[in-house]
Image: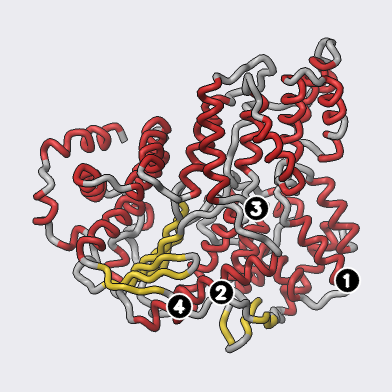
Amino acid sequence: MHSRRLLLLLAPVLLPVALFAAKPPELYPGLSRKWQYYQSPNFELYSANNDRDSRDVLERMELLRALFMDTFQLKPRLPQPVTIYYFDRQADFDGYRPPHVRGGDAKYMGFCNNFPDRTVITIAPARDRDTTTEVIYHEYIHYLFRLAEQNPAPWFNEGVAELFSTMQEDKEWLQLGQPVEGRVFELQRGRMMPFEQLFAVRYDSPLFKDSGHTGMFYAQSWAFLHYCHFGVNKIPPEKMSLFLRAAGSSETQDRPEEFRAVCRELLGMDYPQLLREMEKYVTVGRFMGRKAKRPTIPPRQGYTVRAAARDEMQLALAELAVRMTDSPYGNLFVRAQLEQAPNARLRELLGAVAIQEDDTDRAREHWRAAIELGTTNAAIFRELGRLEANAVFGHFDLDYRMPEKRAADLRHLLNKSLEFAPAQSQAYEMLAWVEAMSDKPDIASLNQIQGKFASLNDRARTLLALVIVRMRLGDKAAAMELLNHLDKLKPNDWVRYCAELTRARLENRPVDPNRLPNVTGPGIRITLPGINLPH
């Protein structure tokens, strides 16, 4: 990585801008094709295909998005731009395959990659339209969980993605629950794992990371959620609905015994019984789906379209090459364009590249430049605010006072993020900690946070911040009253640890070691949902 940085520093001196125009078009596969640029309510699309197929892609993505949000009664909270590249030649698509999937005989049909600033989808020519869309739908569901600020356990995340990946249109209806190719075979030839093992798999588990999106973990996750949504069983619908709501919570893995009790209460089965029930379900093999009413979305005729000129496509494909293949030449081209004219989107891109290289200082530099250039990308304000907050909140310290200039800067970033994405939770949670550590807490910010408190994801951690604010303002009675409500919010171990430190300070006594849970590492550090996106 260091040698690459050196190349990037030297290249502007060694390679004049004029050289780029002389390079052959195969440096950016597909550049010689005719491209159109489409815009729908939630996507932008660069397409080298005909108008009907291009609008089909956008319409199906809009339908999937609406269906997912309606099914789980979720709302977009962390908006992030989505760009789709739709190639008309397999060779052009293959030119942007990530390095780790090159070589061999495997034919890839699509990729969905999440970056800090935007999500990028690439689609190959539709030799097998159903298989191609299944791949894209699956990965896009992971994006939608992030969009809604949801971070479910891996089994739930992957199972839902598999369920929705086979969505098919049927006039005014959408067909859901069709068997996923290969999953039934895996289930019927193999042995399902105990449910306590399935539910305990985490995103850093080898079973998840090293499986290549195959194996019993994925098959069983899909089959169990298929059983829950479409299976014929004696479980009352209202209890199944409550179970699915609990299963989708990010807290299930932190409280395994509670979730097991929920399973017994709502499904009427403990894990061994549930495994036997699933073995029967798989053996019978009648994976019936159902129809869902087609959600209302803006008509496809309203998607805007224009021709994409060669210069525009050269830059768009250079951006894609940087993101997907870490192209040094594409990186040089992007930087050369910035030398000629300021460009907020290119600054966003280079900030994302810096994050991939673990260079947070350069990421800050590029994203601040994007903000100065007038970006309206809410993800940039959110990510920059997260970086700045994490630079401050390395560990919990009741005596820390944030310099006013830094506090004002963080308030500005977080409020701009809320301006573009007012439904989000994370910016309010971060803002609460800014005020908790600020020398002069801002009353307007506190009113904002308290007004949104009921809708926040991590209310326990936010309540602790508000307790500290009351301490800072000298109102110990109000601080203690708030702290006494903390247990009702089921705080995690880190919040409980910090709450004991805070309570000891309020009561003017030593910290009681018997009340301290065993925790390691920083706890205020803000992390986005940890969905691991396999390519």
Disc 4 vs disc 3: Cβ atoms closer than 8 Å? no
Nearer the observer, 489 or 533: 489
Marks 3 and 1: which is nearer the front? 3
* Alpha carbons under labels 2 and 3: distance apart: 20 Å
Q: Secondary structure at mark 3?
A: loop
Label annotation for residue 63 = 2
Say which amino acid is labelled 4.
Gly
Q: Residue at x 77, y 20 (%)?
A: 502
Label annotation for residue 236 = 1
Nearer the observer, 474 or 483: 474
Q: Residue at x 24, y 50 (%)?
A: 330
* Alpha carbons under labels 4 and 1: distance apart: 42 Å
Tell me where residue 310 sits by quadrant. bottom left
Estimate the x, y position of residue 35 in percent, counting from the top left: 27, 72
Estimate the x, y position of residue 160 in percent, counting from the top left: 64, 64
Q: Residue at x 23, y 46 (%)?
A: 341
